[in-house]
Structures are given as C-alpha cells and as structure tokens.
Image (cartoon, rainbow, N blue to C red):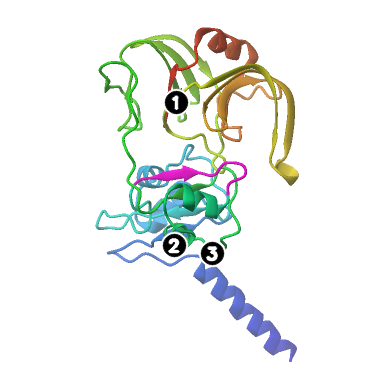
Amino acid sequence: MKITLRVSIGLIVLFAATASWVAPTAAVAPDFVIVRWGDTLPGIAARAGTTVDALIRLNSLPNPNFLYAGQRLFIQRASGAPANPPVTGSVYTVNPGDTLATVATRFGTSVSEVLRVNGLVNPNFIYVGQRLNIPGRAQSPAPQPGNAPAPFPLRAGTLTAPTAGKWIDIDLGDQTTTAYQGTTPLKSVRVSTGVAWTPTPIGHFKIYTKLAAQTMSGGSGANSYYLPNVPYVMYFTGAYALHGTYWHANFGTPMSHGCVNLSTPDAKWFYDWAEIGTPVVTHL
C-alpha cells in the first residue's frame, strides 16, 4: 500500500510539473507560460523559441530583470500573431477598490469576457497593479500635448513627445525622470518606479493634483505600508504620482507600488517647476 501511494504521488507531481510547461513545436509557441522559481527572461525566451525583446513588448514588462513565480507571460506565435494577448491593445491596471465586475462595467464588457482573454480562473481574485487585457475596446491614441507633436526618440517606439512647453519624461528602462522645456532637457535624476507586479503605467498623462505632503497607505499583509508626510506629491494618473521618498535611497532600481519615487530634494525641484496640467510621458 505504501509503495502504491508513493507511485501515485510521484505520478501526480510529474503531471503537475509537466503541465506547467508545454514544449514548443517548431511551428507554434505556447499561448503563455507560467514563470517558475529560477526562471529568467532569456531562459523563457530560449525555451519558447522567441526573443527577450518580444516578451518585453508583448507583456509590457517595465523591467526585464523582475519576474515572479506564478507570473503569466504571453508568447508570440511563430507566425507573428500573438496567441492570447490584448485583442484590441487596451490594457487596464487594477486600482485599489476595483473588482472584476466594476472593471468590466467601466469598459462595456462582461466578467466572462475579461476572464477569457486574460486566462483567469477565479473572478473574485484580482490584485492592485495587475494588468488586465480589455476585450472589444480599441485603444484610442492618447491626446498629444503641444501644438504639433513630433516623433521623439523614446524606446517605446509609438509614443510621441511635446515639442513646446514644459513636460516630464519618465524612462522606466533607465529609471530616470527628466524635466524638458520643449526639446531641451533641464534636469534629469535617478528615480525608482514600480516593480513588475505593481508597474508604473505607460502612456501620456498630465499632472492633475499637487500636494505639499500626504499620508500614503495601502497593500495588505507583508506588502502593507503606512507612510506619513510623503513630501511633494504630484498625481499624474489615478493613484500614481511623482513624490519625494524618505524611506529608501535606492534610486535607479524599481522599488515602488507604481508611483515614481524621487529623492526629497529632487521631488521639491520638480514640484516647484511643474504646474498642474504639465504633460507626463512614461515609457520603456
């Protein structure tokens, strides 16, 4: 009986390990892979017959060095069409208080459709910072600040930058934030943006609220935080802001829940320089 039990357990473990990865064929890569402990982006790319750049682009990864066990990564098919990525290119980042039902209602779709296109099983479990593909909603081009937007050498490729006036560039790849006057950089500093599981949103935004100081709290369990008197806060979309940071000095490395962490002196400079309505461009 003991021998039979051991064999059965062994078969279950072998099946579970096999099910987590389906070897790609020469013609078509898997729809997605689940990141395992010890995985790296180059290793996953090699196994799936794709490239690191393709994985970063398809999954909108803010930092190729940050993966976590259980993360779902979409894989590009050999034919060039994505297997199960956003159908329309619209992606929503989950905010505190969101449920799958409220997200579906906001975008005029259904919970079952959001579950389907994201490969989700449990409709009652989503987390802050999670990126959800939104079905049946084409993403409109973001309105461009300035009078005549022109291509700017951003690594995101499809983003454009203002050609006049003040604007703020946030480079998630280099972990830098730069103040521009038209095409002239005025000040560039090291920052810490969101980690992979709570990424900083990518796109065109504007500063809509400024607060000299604010208490910030959130998360749960080991990931909970309570930070009184966060200085020089400038919100640019939803709950995402540029702000001063006194609890770490590891600028140049992703550290945040999605906000842009600056040193307190740097945050003050940007706070004094930028007005409400100043464009913010975030990109890889």
Q: Locate residue 123: give its quadrant.
A: bottom right
**Residue at mark 3:** 121
The disc labelled 1 sits on which kind of residue?
Answer: Asp
| Count of marks placed on residues | 3
The reply to whether callout 2 and callout 3 are in contact (CB within 8 Å) is no
Q: Which mark is residue 171?
A: 1
Residue 156 in view: yes
Q: Is residue 51 above or below residue 246?
A: below
**Residue at mark 2:** 116
Helix, strand or loop at mark 1? strand
The reply to whether callout 2 and callout 1 are in contact (CB within 8 Å) is no
Q: Which residues are magenta?
A: 89-98
Helix, strand or loop at mark 2? helix
The residue lying at 48 percent from left, 51 percent from top is 105
The disc labelled 2 sits on which kind of residue?
Answer: Arg
Q: CA distance from mark 2 to mark 3?
A: 9 Å
Q: CA distance from mark 2 to mark 1?
A: 32 Å
